[in-house]
Image (cartoon, rainbow, N blue to C red):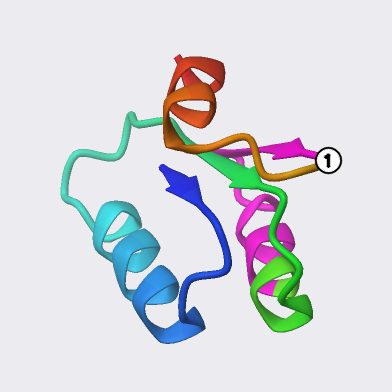
Amino acid sequence: MPVFNQRVHFFREAVESVLRQTYTDLHLIIVDDGSTDAKLIHHMENYAKDHRVTLVKNETNQGIAVSLNLGI
């Protein structure tokens, strides 16, 4: 899931939707594409504490194509 300074509410809704699935053997990769929103970063780091979630960070905004490739 590529993320760049999106609204926290929508980010949380998307992640919670994945994590609430009945199929529990999943791995969610969140790629932070250089976000600067402290509240969003805080939520990404909290979700990364879940063993099913991996957080990957770009130091600067690289764009969606780079972030998707990094996640893959």
Queried whether the magenta region covers residue 44, the answer comes back as: yes
Which residues fall within the magenta stretch? 43-58
Q: How many marks?
A: 1
The single residue placed furthest to the right in the displayed view is 59
Q: Is residue 56 left or right of residue 27?
A: right
Q: Identify the image quadrant of the C terminus.
A: top left
Question: What residue is rendered at 47% in x and 16% in y?
Answer: 69
Residue carrying label 1:
59
Q: Nearer the viewer, residue 14 or 64?
A: 64
Above or below, 1 against 50 in this view is above
Residue at image position (83%, 40%) is 59
Q: Position of residue 10 (x, y in %)?
A: 35, 77
* Quadrant location, the N terminus: top left
- Under tag 1, what secondary structure? loop
The residue positioned farthest toward the left in the image shown:
22
> As drawn, is 14 to the left or to the right of 59?
left
